[in-house]
Amino acid sequence: MNTTEFVQHIIEERNEDTDMKIYCEASAKETAQLMSESFIYPLYGAAWTAFYDMETITQHLNELHDSRNYFGLVYFITLLAGALETNIPLLFTQMSLSSTRVHILSDAIIEDWLECHDTNEVTNKCN
């Protein structure tokens, strides 16, 4: 899914009022972790190999997360994926729809991003 499809899907899901769907928080956390790992590691690797300023991106993501701007963090990742022509998983979009799930998704994203960044190299896992 590209950036345009991401936005279109959010609009469609919002119109269907998916915020009201019942979900298990433990399942949501596990799902977010699995989805984030499969998306964020390659995204980090793509940004690194494209010579993006990884320190600045990481600092910005940390600031968004620390200020609890979880929607901002998710949308920044979406913009980054669009700039790098990286596909966005459908599940990423679905989890971006509610404040509870976006918080869980944001936590998973920052954890995976920092894991790649803290190694100071792009390993096989992060590309």
Image (cartoon, rainbow, N blue to C red):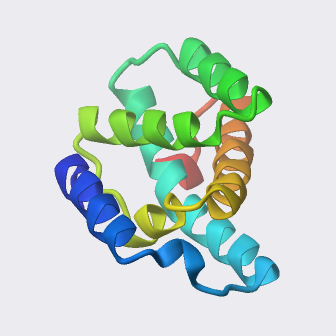
Answer above or below: position of 37 versus 60: below
In percent of width and height, residue 47 lies at 41, 31
Measuring 34% from the left and 60% from the top, which residue is drawn there? 10
Give the image location of residue 100, x and y in percent: 70, 61
User: Which residue is pictured at 41% across the width and 62% down the height?
Assistant: 93
Against 124, is 94 above or below? below
Residue at x 33%, y 25% (from the top left corner): 50
Residue shown at 38% from the left, 29% from the top: 49
Quarter-of-image position of residue 101:
bottom right
Lateral position of residue 8 relative to residue 81, left or right:
left
Against 48, residue 60 (above or below) is above
Q: Is residue 87 left or right of residue 44?
A: left
Q: Position of residue 92 (x, y in %)?
A: 46, 63
Residue 98 vs residue 123, the one in the foreground: 98
Residues 34 and 125: in front is 34
Quarter of image, res 16: bottom left
Number of callouts: 0
Would residue 68 be visible to someone looking at this image? yes
Screen quadrant of the N terminus: bottom left
- Horizontal and vertical percent position of residue 36: 58, 60
Q: Nearer the viewer, residue 16 or 124?
A: 16
Q: Is residue 26 left or right of residue 92?
A: right
Q: Is residue 119 visible?
A: no
